[in-house]
Image (spheres, coloured by chain):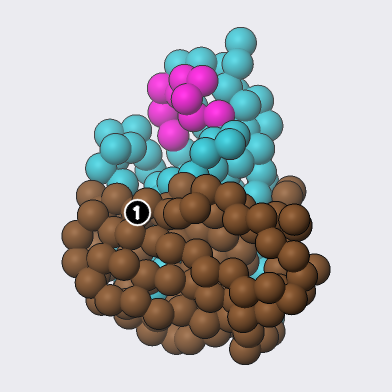
Chain colours: A brown, B cyan
Amino acid sequence: EILLTQSPGTLSLSPGERATLSCRASQTIRITYIAWYQQKPGQAPRLVISGASGRAAGIPDRFSASGSGTDFTLTITRLEPEDFAVYYCQQFVSPPQTFGQGTKVEIK
Amino acid sequence: QVQLQESGPGLVKPSETLSLTCTVSGGSISSYYWHWIRQPPGKRLEWIGYIFNTGRTIFNPSLKSRVTISADTSNNQFSLTLNSVTAADTAVYYCARSESPAAASGHWGQGTLVIVSS
């Protein structure tokens, strides 16, 4: 099973600032098999970006993903009020699919 | 626009069986991959398994001995059963869809909370 470790646990930022979220895998994965989700309280996760398909429908271009090997990054260039949430990375290179423990992006 | 909706009991007794159904609208379950994913309170998401071709299944090895996923094409639904539940199975359960086994889940249900307690 591939373990995903996200950092930091919490990111305290102000609107307009840049957010950089990290996801480290326990073994090498192609970015094609990495996705990022946004989750707000009481809601289901929402796909933000997939390495294979790019940004999901309705996701603005301030969100981008990068990385290779075992280290992957989700970047939000200028935080908007609606971006404050918990973000999870996911790998689906082979079963079982696994998720990171999440990074909470909170308003400073 | 495909929509997914989970349904089932919100309370299950320890050692009993958890049963949930996901009703799909706006698309046929005969195509794509249909997943169950859960999230214990305050913890990370855990993938349970998926069904495709309305009958073939793949499960998380950690749950494989207790899990069944089945499909009902006449009602466009798929279901999850989890046997011998304990308090550790308390979670919000989500159904979701992906376009292939190696793809992100772009469509999710709203989730349903299942509490295991006597």
Residue in the foreground of this view, choosing between A90 and B15: A90
Label 1 crowding class (10 Å Cα cut-off): few <14, some 14-19, many 20+? many
Res B19 seen here: no
> Would residue A52 be counted in the magenta stretch?
no
Residue for point 33% across, 37% down = B63
Residue in the foreground of this view, choosing between B28 and B12: B12
> Residue B1 occupies which quadrant of the picture?
bottom right
Residue for point 68% across, 73% down = A17
- The residue labelled by disc 1 is A4
Q: Mark 1 falls within which chain? A: A
Question: What is the residue that sits farthest to the top in this orientation?
Answer: B118
Amino acid type shown at disc 1:
Leu
Residue B44, percent across and down? Answer: 49, 44
Residue in the foreground of this view, choosing between A51 and B22: A51
Q: What stretch is highlighted in magenta?
A: B82-90
> Residue A71 occupies which quadrant of the picture?
bottom left
Residue B18, percent across and down? Answer: 52, 32
**B63 versus A10 height, above or below:** above
Q: In which quarter of the image is the C terminus of chain B?
A: top right
Residue for point 62% across, 74% down = A18
Residue for point 37% across, 70% down = A72
Q: Is residue A69 left or right of residue B55?
A: left
Residue B10, percent across and down? Answer: 68, 32
Question: What is the residue that sits farthest to the right in this orientation?
Answer: A81
All told, the count of numbered labels is 1
Residue in the foreground of this view, choosing between A64 and B1: A64
Res A34 seen here: yes
Residue B26, percent across and down? Answer: 66, 77
Q: In this view, does B90 lie to the left or right of A97?
A: right
**A108 versus B88 height, above or below:** below
> Residue A87 occupies which quadrant of the picture?
bottom right
Q: Is mark 1 on a helix, strand or loop?
A: strand
